[in-house]
Image: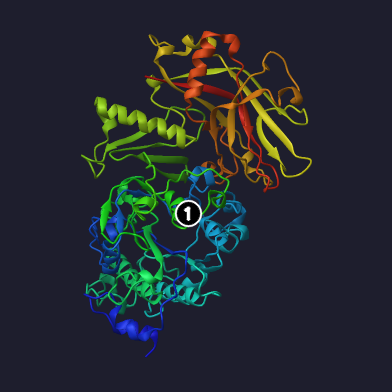
Amino acid sequence: MSIMAGVRAFTQAAVILISAMAPMYGAPVQAAESPNIIMIVGDDQGVDAIEGAAWPNDLQCHTPNLAMFAANGRSFTNCRVNALCSPSRAMILSGRTALQTGVTNVIHKNPSEYALFALQGHERTIGEMLHDLGYYTLLIDKWHVGVSDDQMPLAQGFDVYRSKEEYRPLDDPIAVGDEHLTKMVEFAIHDVTSRPDPNSPYALFFWSSDPHSRRDQSGREPLKWWRVDESLLPSGEPYYHQDPADDTERDRYRAVVEAMDTEIGRMLYQLGVINANGQYRPESNTVVFYLGDNGTPEEVAPRADHAKGSLFEGGINVPLFVFGHNVPADGQILDRLISGLDLFDTIGDIVAAPMEMRGEFPRQGMSFADDIDPSIETLPQRDFTISSRASSKPPKCWVALADDRYKLICSGGTNWAVPLHMDAFYDMESDPTEDINLIDADLTIKQEAAYLVLRDAVMDHWYTAVSTRKKLYADIPLTDRYSITSLNTKPRNQKVGHINPGLGDAVEARSFYRFDVENLEQYLPRGRTIDDVVAARIILIFDSDSLAPDETDTGEITAYVMKEPWSWREKTWDELVNGHRADLQVGHVDLAPHVIWDFLGHSGVPVPEGAPISLGSSDLLLQLVRLWHADWKSNRGVVLIADPINSLPGDQSVRFKRAALLRLTLR
């Protein structure tokens, strides 16, 4: 009997397709000194499509393996990702938000267009970190964050890549027994067990393309979800009818979820991670993560308007559990706020990766390794999660921030510094289904305070979201601006950054701004004074040069306070290069390589007004505003300086529109 025949012959519902396999396979994989890492991602699987005590499972999916594994580890109910797969996978790989990497929308195959906002080759991935630590790294099935060669797994730290594009066409939509899922599991087992050094630790990223829908291009199969081999469905549920026309998308989807549960159980057993009873084997020295990449699709979700693609919980709240090496097998269900961003540093902490091996680019992820491995000291917890959804027709970006009770969904900003569009604000404790938009009614004092906190957090962490309710802010305009390069040329627009910084003929550009703080009262609402100002941030308007073909990435841009006057007459580069206070930073931003591209609908036509860029609120800037207002002679403005990325060639500079403003938030 073949391995697969033996597996399919055993379909009892109460056991996890494991106990009958015990005599069929050889010795489990040998443990290594460093813990092996397995990360399994279900494609389009929300909390309504997984069995277990931590999730509602509104679709009544049968996933006994996953339920058992979660019960023998720890589950996290407040895990959120992005609304679509590519941005979610990029955040997991890099620990960086969609606006930091530029992966704000779904990546398609056309390299001439989509390579610009894919995960760029210079990004530090979790695969590269683990590979450099001596791990044998494998990415099985779905990548979906790159198109050009330097953006694919083999160039991003993975030793093995099995692409869904290469193997999925072998899965006939009508026939059974040739399941793509089964092929991918076979590859994972083979590639791990036959790795060059069987004693080396491995990191398996089994990023399944199931249970995502798969349209049959031939038209033979009208439903989006294909039939799977019924021997993989031990529940006995009537997913399939004698007449296929009687099948439903929801039943087909549930069948794929169940088949995936079965094959994941088999994969973990054959890798030696679990025993015949589905219990973790400590000698395997393996930590297993399981999560979804976004919510359940609208065709099958309980609420189509709160499903995949939306920023409601049905679109971004996904199952996450961890079990294995050093993870307490207590089945705890934790409500800690978790973002997909956090997996990078969490795994980094579990494998004790030095910070220098995690990359030079800023990350917004926060490790939750202390809830996985009690031997790790208590770590700070995040105040909110951040999720996003970009659309290109019309160009629009939406962002959602959620703390442990409230959630704000709003426009992420794409055009000038227009007031932030308030779409929705929810109390998820009293309204978990997000039906009551609190903005439609008067907020209580507590709700207003929570709203203001999340609103300011949007502007600080989602840098194109720069505005708030009209009555709560005032804009102070420029009085002076200046831009100069190290060649003493003066760009027409404000320019910041470097060209070929790692070479001897590198060119740098800096921009200077001074705001009309001495006349602040004339810009404040009637009856307000400087004493009502509680926050300050600088807002720039991004120009269109992120589409330049030779641009790579601009390092983090920081605003420093000037100590030398410049606004009353032009000065040379040599006079200004050391004219700032390097110890006084009043804002910063980490721009994506091609941040505007997706907002433009992939057309290459720039938004005429430009896109807003916030440098974030700064307590020091607020103090300076008060000082500058009291003593106008002390107001020498700020300079914007970009960090060079010496490992990258090409143009690392960006241009801003001539206009800029100092936005003050009022109490």
Of 409 and 172, which appears nearest the observer?
409
**Could you tell me residue 131's position as x and y percent?**
55, 62
**Could you tell me residue 346's position as x and y percent?**
43, 52
User: Horizontal placement of 558 versus 406: left or right?
Assistant: right
Q: Is residue 71 above or below residue 355?
A: below
* Residue at 33 percent of width and 77 percent of height: 229
Q: Amino acid at mark 1?
A: Gly
Q: Is residue 420 above or below residue 379?
A: above
| Quadrant into which the C terminus falls | top left
Q: Is residue 66 above or below residue 485?
A: below
* Residue at 20 percent of width and 39 percent of height: 430
Of 431 and 285, which appears nearest the observer?
285
Residue annotated with mark 1: 348
* Quadrant in the picture for residue 543: top right
**Could you tell me residue 90's position as x and y percent?**
49, 52
Of 166 and 260, which appears nearest the observer?
260
